[in-house]
Image: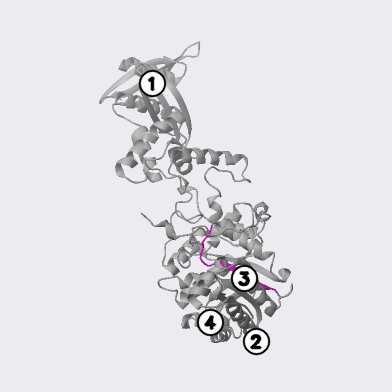
Amino acid sequence: MMNYTKYRPYPTMNMPNRKWPDNVITKAPYWCSVDMRDGNQSLEIPMSLGEKMEFFNFLVKTGFKEIEIGFPAASDTEYEFARKLIEENLIPDDVVVQVLTQSRPHIIKKTFQALKGAKKAIVHLYNSTSTLQRDVVFGNSMEETTALAVEGAKLLLSEADKMPETKFMFQYSPESFTGTEMDYAVEICNAVIDVIKPTPDNKMIINLPSTVEMATANVYADQIEYCSERLKRRDSVILSLHAHNDRGCAVAATELALMAGAERVEGTLFGNGERTGNTDIMALAMNMFSQGIDPCLDFSDIDAAVKIYERTTRMPVHPRHPYAGSLVYTAFSGSHQDAIRKGMERMKEHPDRWEVPYLPIDPKDVGRTYDPIVRINSQSGKGGVAFVLEQNYGLFLPKAFQQDFSYVVTGFSDENHKDVAPSVIRDIFFKEYADLRSPVSVEKYREAEVYDNGDIMVKAGITYNGKEVEITGVGNGIIDAFTHAVEKYLDIKLEIVDYREHSMEYGTKARAISYVQIKNDKGQVGFGAGTSSNIIKSSLRAVVSAVNKIIK
């Protein structure tokens, strides 16, 4: 048994008048990618200089205006990357790079050296403030911890004064904010604000990180609202979030915290980062997109994001990952497939409004096609099989025909222990139902006579068990007459339960396909299909195919 007794519930906030639950997200926050710092430092094999450059360019193309490029004082690669971007003028004018530094003098000074010559930059200062970190790691009091942050902030200003050519913005993070006493978190942030003295025209960023996710998402929102209402110079402060995913709720926590007053989000593509990772910016942005909000980030080619991420991080994107996974727009369940098929059909009535069951967004919006929406395996049903034939091959089976065919396909999948590709489904359909010639085949036909009541006599040449014979029948149409002729010759009773036909292609030489459902006097049912450029021939072939199914 797992020993749960050594853990304690995380304390909640006493905020009976909290406002955030009634708020709604109406616009995208400021986005800051930390893929090349927080994400990169968590990799087994960190990105090379070339890989970082490739990733940086992709982030710019996606629409990020703030990108944390690294921790320049941490390694030569991090330092060299900052220098390469600046010296080779590779930072677009509308993009600002961010660098991280601990509140330690020699690290702060090296960080500014890495930024020399930059047009603009965000310098991100942090020190640990949580009760646990103060007691266990650093052995510092609150006063000593605050003094460390204040001295670091003063040094930021001092170093920035030496580089008047660069427009600096300053950011402060009380690391492990969620494990910090809230009154003290406000106190230390305000102490840094007092040093930086931001104004509405020259703002600073206060970043409140859930460095380790320790509580439910609503607690983070409470903490953000609590601090947002108590920070000094609030109109001069951009309140930022940086949530980790230890409880698997980073995206939810970030959404609630935005409702609680935050304006900026730091995160990574696909949630990469230490331990279980960071807020997944792609998922968060696409969540907003699905609510009719412009996310201000372009994921219209989601597969490109997957490819560059997997190549540079050497980590796979899970097939069920929100929005980007290879299977997230795919249904195997029969009931889901049927609902999707009906929803796609209904969309023709209102193409300007997306409403399809089980698909929160249109796959085409992220560069996917409709081809893999429905994949057929042993769990699938008639709706899914019908959808594949309709979407890929323009074959529209009647409902009962769909049911019969679905058993054939799912049986094939079950026997082979794999899903069935659309081309295989098509091949199974034609092999099992279309233009069957054994034991009966139709070779020719002609209208022999038309009676005053409108009935028609048909004479047809058929082959039965290799023997060529001529049969004759009368009915209210060619198909009915031909069926009666077959009845008489084979000495069986047949009833056409359903008959449909449609063109398979466009143009004057288009082939027709006919579908027939026939029942005999014993209750046995046969389904058959026939194809031909002549609609009568396709219909007779469908009748013969259905008869052959019953005979067999």
Tag nearer the camera, 4 or 1:
4
Question: What amino acid does circle 1 point to?
Answer: Lys
| Cα–Cα span, label 4 and label 1 | 78 Å
| Label 1 secondary element | strand
Q: Quadrant of residue 413?
A: top left
- Residue at the spot of label 4: 84
Tag nearer the camera, 1 or 3:
3
Closer to us: 194 or 519: 194
Q: Taking the image as drawn, is residue 226 in sight?
A: yes
Q: Is residue 507 above or below residue 246?
A: above
| Label 3 secondary element | helix
Closer to us: 524 or 395: 524
Q: Quadrant of residue 489?
A: top left
- Residue at the spot of label 1: 519
Dot 3 alpha-carbon crowd within 10 angstroms: few under 14, some 14 to 19, many 20 or more = some
| Cα–Cα span, label 2 and label 1 | 92 Å
Q: Taking the image as drawn, is residue 509 in sight?
A: no
Most distant residue in the bottom direction: 162
| Cα–Cα span, label 2 and label 3 | 26 Å
Q: Quadrant of residue 542?
A: top left
Are the residues tagged 2 and 4 within 8 Å (C-beta)?
no
